[in-house]
Image: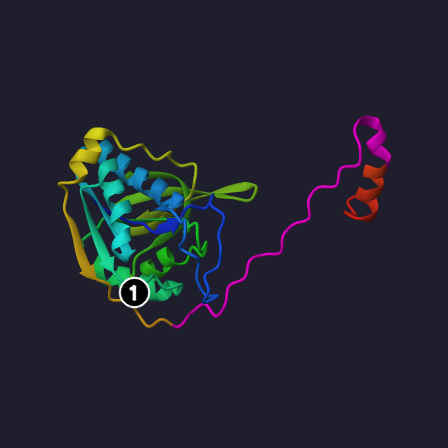
Amino acid sequence: MKIAVCVKRVPDMELRFAIAGDRKSLDQGGLKYDMSDFDGYALEVALRLVEKQGSGEVELLCLGPDGVQEILRKGLAMGAARAIQLKADTVPVDGLAIAQALAAELGTGGYDLILFGRMATDTASGTVGPMVAELLGLPCVTSISHLELDVGRGMARRDLEGATETVRFPLPAVLTIDEGIARPRLATLKGIMAAKKKPLEVKPAALGEVRLIVETMALPPERSGPKFMGEGADAVPELVQRLHTEAKVL
């Protein structure tokens, strides 16, 4: 089984962000980057599928500047066999332009499965995976919380609000993986050393036309701090009044 996992390099979401002087991008000062969380789940699912079948390999794809090689090496250390960087100086916010670049590469790879995280943790659009499926003419199942494969076909479960949905699909297919399906493994020292010798190919990204651009960015207004109204039973009357008159939840 040959599985491609498309990953994205995103800022550490625990950091405090600042907007750069152009008002269209993030201030890079102090930013740290890592693999998008959902992409880590997708990689873990791919590795387990190959390990369960005892054959096959996992290949990583990532679009972006040379900085993405850091997360590709991380994925190789976790167990992927090879990686491809689709080189672009910047990563556009236009999901279709990205999908076209990925599809141009994935269409010639002969993959049984193409996995994405449910969404990137920076843009949270969740559109690139389904767009790649459409461009390649492959079936697509999104937000998968459970996956089983048989010869030439698969079964996936999707968690809906208050219900679950089970779907069957033929291979090859494009899947997007939700959180909770598998906790990503940590790279071992042996894996880190092995990753240095694994192939990491660099190719120019065949980005499609970028028609979606950021005009301006702004931070949300600061939230007002909590209002302390005393302690214990003495605070209850004012708390009830504020829940009724301000929050309007009573």
Residue at 85% x, 41% y: name it: 241
130 to 23, vertically: above or below: above
Image coordinates of residue 181 in percent, x first then y, are 40, 37
Q: Nearer the viewer, residue 16 or 1?
A: 16
Which residue in the rendered view is the most extreme toward the top?
232
Picture quarter containing residue 51?
Answer: top left
Left or right of residue 35: residue 237: right
30 to 86, vertically: above or below: above
Identify residue for label 1: 100
Residue at 38% x, 50% y: name it: 10
Dominant secondary structure of the magenta stretch? loop
Q: Nearer the viewer, residue 76 or 171?
A: 76
Left or right of residue 159: residue 134: left
Residue 107 visible, this angle: no
| Magenta residues, start to end | 211-237
Q: Secondary structure at mark 1?
A: helix
Picture quarter containing residue 183?
Answer: top left
Image coordinates of residue 126 in percent, x first then y, are 43, 55
Residue 181 visible, this angle: yes
